[in-house]
Amino acid sequence: MDIFCIKAVSLGDLEKVLISCDGAGPGNGWFLDKIVIKYKEGKEAQEVVFPCYRWLDEHQDDGKTERELTANSKYFVKEYSCYNNIVY
């Protein structure tokens, strides 16, 4: 699991995420379970889940290295101080 914390201006309601793999180097592909973005908007903290369950690899699955993911849920969660992007 990789976790990235990014301080940013408000991104509004998140509906889609575009993610890709550059394909550089041997064994460069990877399996993406989901992306979870946790953020605070006003007084309420929220979590948005973007499921994938696919490979980003020229030689695996359907060979795609770019995927557009659509949010399937939005939850109100405990308070967060920045955008936490969690890639499973």
Image: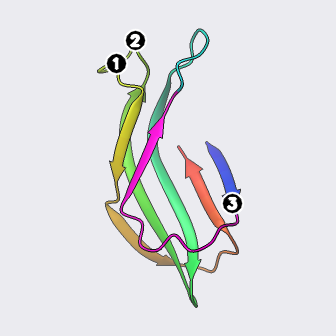
Amino acid at dot 3: Ile
What kind of element bears circle 3?
Answer: strand
Q: Quadrant of residue 42?
A: bottom right
Q: Residues within 10 Å of mark 2 (few under 14, many from 20)?
A: few
Q: What secondary structure is found at the residue carrying circle 1? A: loop
Label drawn at residue 6: 3
Residue annotated with mark 1: 63
Q: The N terminus lies in which quarter of the figure? A: top right
Instruction: Looking at the picture, tell me which residue is in the foreground, 32 or 64.
Output: 64
Above or below, comparing residue 7 to residue 81 in the picture? above
Question: For the point 46% across and 74% down, which residue is it?
Answer: 12
Residue 55 is drawn in which quadrant? top left
The amino acid type of the residue labelled 2 equals His
Point 36% across, 63% down: residue: 15
Q: Is 51 in front, or is 12?
A: 12
Residue 17 sits inside the magenta stretch: yes
Percent across and percent down for residue 78 are 59, 79
Q: Which residues are magenta?
A: 7-21
Q: Residue at x 70, y 75 (%)?
A: 81
In three-dimensional space, the C-alpha distance between marks 2 and 1, rounded to whole angstroms, equals 5 Å
Labels 1 and 3 touching (C-beta < 8 A): no
The vertical placement of 42 against 4, above or below, is: below
* Position of 62 relative to 19 (above/below): above
Spatial distance from mark 3 to mark 2, Cα to Cα?
A: 31 Å
The image shows residue 58 at horizontal and vertical percentages of: 41, 15
Q: Which residue is mark 2?
A: 59
